[in-house]
């Protein structure tokens, strides 16, 4: 456990206290590959569980299409970076639905050395999920 000391100068009086920084718990998750002859995707992540974020995952061989090769014009695609991998993220808004029923679909793929680790969710909190993706570490070394 790491201690961080904080010194505050208040109206000429020095106040010193120590804060304890709790270690961030890292979790590991293995996702079987879509191709049974290819290795599984193994990731380390911090924070919320994928279940609490309503994320679904897939592990694809490098040769498999991800959908980011030629996205539809209405799909908003942006680059995303995890701890040790680069990838893409897309947002699709269901604008054909009535306003009260509209959803946003988030898709992403991180490109590893052996596999592509992809996921999707129907979400409201895209910034929460984007921050979660950025903390992923692919265990196959990822793509820098």
Image: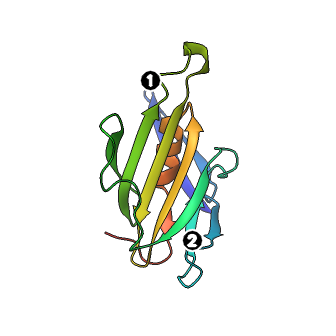
Disc 1 secondary structure class: loop
* Picture residue at 49% right of the left edge, 42% below the top: 106
Q: Which residue is mark 2?
A: 34
Q: Quadrant of residue 124?
A: top right
Residue drawn at x 53%, y 39% is 128
Q: Along the horizontal axis of the image, is 9 left or right of 119?
A: left
Q: CA distance from mark 2 to mark 1?
A: 63 Å
Q: Which mark is residue 11?
A: 1
Q: Secondary structure beneath disc 2?
A: loop
Image coordinates for residue 127, horizontal then vertical, percent:
48, 37
Q: Nearer the viewer, residue 110 or 73?
A: 73
Q: Residue furthest top?
A: 99
**Neighbour class for label 2 at 10 Å: few (<14), some, many (≥20)?**
some
Q: Nearer the viewer, mark 2 or mark 1?
A: 2
Q: Give x and y (percent) for residue 118.
A: 50, 59
Q: Position of residue 72 (x, y in %)?
A: 33, 42
Farthest right residue in view: 51
């Amino acid at each position: 456990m790491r201690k961080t000391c904080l010194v505050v100068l208040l109206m000429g009086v020095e106040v010193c206290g120590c804060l304890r920084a709790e270690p961030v718990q890292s979790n590991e998750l293995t996702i079987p590959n879509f191709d049974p002859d290819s290795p599984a995707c193994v990731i380390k992540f911090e924070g919320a569980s994928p279940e609490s974020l309503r994320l679904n995952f897939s592990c694809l061989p490098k040769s498999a299409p991800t959908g980011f090769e030629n996205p539809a014009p209405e799909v908003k695609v942006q680059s995303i970076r995890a701890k040790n991998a680069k990838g893409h993220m897309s947002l699709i808004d269901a604008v054909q639905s009535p306003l009260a029923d509209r959803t946003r679909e988030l898709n992403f793929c991180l490109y590893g050395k052996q596999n592509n680790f992809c996921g999707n969710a129907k979400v409201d909190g895209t910034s929460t999920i984007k921050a979660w993706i950025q903390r992923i570490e692919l265990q196959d070394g990822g793509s820098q």
